[in-house]
Every structure is written in C-alpha cells, then in structure tokens.
Image (cartoon, grey):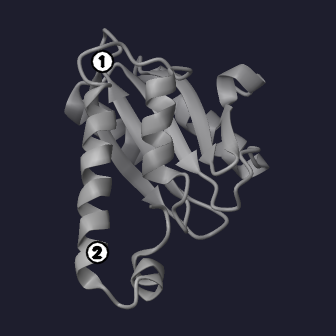
Amino acid sequence: MSARSAERIELLDDSIEVERTFICFRRAMTQMLRGQLVQRPILSNDQMLLDYLRSRMAFEPIEQLRVLFLNAGNELIGDEVLGVGSVSGVYASPREILKRCLDLGATAILLVHNHPSGCSKPSHADRELTEKIARAASCLNVVVHDHLIVARNGTTSFRKAGYL
C-alpha cells in the first residue's frame, strides 16, 4: 500500500484498474482511521492517532510537516500539511502555522512530520523549528502539545524525549 503508484503499476503489469482499487482502498482506510479521531480528545500517545499518522505519512518519499489543530477540548478541528520539503528536510513558517491557528480558532496544535529515511530520531533543525513554533505559539496562547516524527521504523515524541 505504501509503494508509489508508478511502482505498483509496474509490479501489476501495467494494470491501471488494480491501481485505482489500491487508491480507493487507501482513501477509505484513511477516512476510517481519521473518523476514529473526530469528536474526542487527541493525545499524542494515542494508538489510534499514531495509526492514522503512520498511514498518512510514514512512507511518503519527501518530508512534510502536518499540523493537527485542536480546540479547547483537544478535539480535532483541522488536519493540514503546512510544509513540504525534500528527502531530508522540511521547512514550515511559524507565522503561517499560527495564522492558520487563528483562522480556525485553535487553542492547541500537534506538530507531526515524517522522515523518509525510516529513522525517527529528531535532527538539530527539527528541534530548532519546534522551538521557534512553540515560542511564537505561546505569545498567542496556543499550546504546542507535542511534535511527533513518524517514520517506517517508529515514532518519536518530542515531549517524551524532553525536547518540548
């Protein structure tokens, strides 16, 4: 399921119909996983959340930063990719993230990004970006609950690792 579309088509002897079925199945699976997160408090160590994030990001070929926007009850009000990078880095603007928080009325956020390398260990740049976002967020009374790095080989929580 995590292979690129072109790779699957090649493996399936150029069968576009089977590829369309894979795409539909993946969309349905994502909707089912996301549906389990709606209208209940989101915690960064929740297995349903980790399953959803893994299905969305763990096998992506380039890094992306996803922001989960939460209301005062820590319920999901938005899930957006706000930064796309390369195979080894991603940049996102703290200003744009916080602008989106204000647009949605979010009182808390959960930052998530993937590592295509498969290793979920945070880099120095990952830690610096998180600090910038957290400092800016605190000025607007927006809580950064956690920053998760999702990879094929696991997930790392900044809060649990002591970076946040």
- The reply to whether callout 1 and callout 2 are in contact (CB within 8 Å) is no
Residue 78 shows in the view: no
Q: Earlier in the sequence, mark 1 or mark 2?
A: 2
- Amino acid under label 1? Glu
Label 2: element kind: helix
126 over 39 or under it: above or below = below
Residue 36, horizontal then vertical, whole percent = 30, 25
Query: For the image shown, how many numbered marks are present on the structure?
Result: 2
What residue is drawn where x is 76% and y is 49%?
A: 123
User: Is residue 114 placed above or below 1 in the rendered structure?
Assistant: above
Q: Left or right? Give the position of 20 relative to 164.
A: left
Quarter of the image containing the N terminus? bottom left
- Residue 69 on image: x %, y %: 34, 30
Q: Secondary structure at mark 1?
A: loop
Q: Is 68 above or below relative to 74?
A: below
Q: Which residue is at 76% across, 44% downward?
A: 121
**What residue appears at the point 58 percent right and 33 percent down from the top-left corner?**
147
Q: Which residue is mark 2?
A: 18
Q: Nearer the viewer, residue 140 or 90?
A: 90
**Crowding near the residue tagged with mark 2, few <14, some 14–19, many ≥20 C-alpha atoms within 10 Å:** some
Q: Is residue 22 visible?
A: yes
Out of 81 and 99, give the one closest to the viewer. Answer: 81
State which quadrant residue 19 falls in: bottom left
Q: CA distance from mark 1 to mark 2?
A: 36 Å
Numbered tag placed on residue 75 in the rendering:
1
